[in-house]
Amino acid sequence: MASYRVISSDSHIIEPPNLWTDRMDKKKWGSQIPHMIKGGDVDWWEMGKTRMATVGAVTQAGLRFERPQDIKQEGTWDAVRPGAYIPAEHIKDMDVDGVWGGLVYPSTGLPLYAQEDPVLLRDVFAAYNDWLAEFCSEFPDRLKGISMIMLEDGVQEGIEEMRRSADMGLAGVMISSFPRKGQAYNEPMYEPFWAAAEELEMPVALHVTTNRPGWTQVIKDGKAVQTGADRVQHDYYPRMDLCHMIFSGVFERYPNLKAANVEHELGWIPFFIKRMDRTYIERPQATPHRFKSGVLPSDFMRNNVYHSFQEDEIGIQLRHYIGVDNLMWGSDYPHAESTFPKSREILEDILKGVPEKEKAKIVGANAAKLYKY
């Protein structure tokens, strides 16, 4: 695989402790600004009285290959890899891993989408986007940032932040993997956002762990927790999003709009595509929007939706049903489940028997086309 330009379509930074405290208006937001609390063996993030994620699992890249039993959520900032927040060190780790380019997502920023106040989050996200643009600007040919966008109670504000992100050189946007309970992305209020994303050629990402409030299933000791069942089934949310968007004609109205389904793996997609087509054909009352020229939902899945995966051998076996041109590998660096520092070895294994032309697309060429490398 040495001749291929490998691009991770799903890499991460880990936010420095001062990212938000240095960049947000203290008079306006005070203790609501995300800040890190040092706690001996555990450091964690807080917003006001809300305790959020600890540093642990996002600091343990490579441990899965040596001592997986030692992976834990708790941890301290001192254990964070320098490559997670220093651009030059990030590039060094990419070189060690045999990865040429990376699409960069947040870490602490992901669960921030579950915080209640959308106005506060718009300022939080803007500060993060500023930092990320600076981070990627040191190696613009290799690092492409994905900005965080809040749409709830302010679609126009979300459009303005997307335009600002594009002006700063960021390559795409991330919205919540599902909107607040009771809402959906087929609603007319989102139409201007899809139109602007198409105009700006900004792919729209649906990344795991970014739901708006109302969807957490388990509360323990007064705090939302993710169970094993939640983690196994987190592809539920992008499935609902894509159904709502496709069945309501979003991609028909905006044929050049691209969506990226990120970190939800692949094996569920063939069944999902088939179910959408059958439902569209057999249940017209449930899917009243009728596509022109005999087009089916599966056509929009293959024309408009990309899928970022990590280690899904079953999905690779079913790649032709999903669409080889739609698959993008990602390392998830530097999280505990990351393939770092054995990404090349793992790619060789999961792509065994795949024709060379298809390998080249999956490991980098598809991401390069979508994000303009």
Image (tube, rainbow, N blue to C red):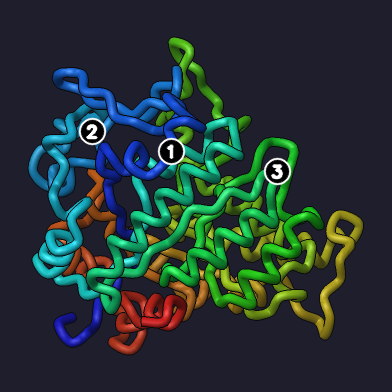
Residue at horizontal 48%, vertical 53%? 148
Q: Is residue 273 rendered to the left or right of residue 222? A: right
Residue at horizontal 29%, vertical 29%? 36
Marks 2/1 in contact by CB < 8 Å: the verdict is no
At label 2, counting other C-alpha atoms closer than 10 Å, the crowd grade (few under 14, some 14-19, many 20 or more) is many
Q: Which mark is residue 231?
A: 1
Residue 92 in percent (x, y) is at 11, 65
Residue under circle 2? Answer: 56
Residue 81 higher or lower than 283, as above or below = above
Residue 173 in percent (x, y) is at 51, 61
Pick the residue in front: 153 or 247. Answer: 153
Foreground: disc 3 or disc 1:
3
Q: Quadrant of residue 303?
A: bottom right
Give the CA distance from mark 2 to mark 1.
Answer: 17 Å
Give the CA distance from mark 3 to mark 1.
Answer: 28 Å
Residue 104 in percent (x, y) is at 34, 60
Q: Quadrant of residue 347?
A: bottom left
Assign a secondary structure to mark 3.
loop
Q: Earlier in the sequence, mark 3 or mark 1?
A: 3
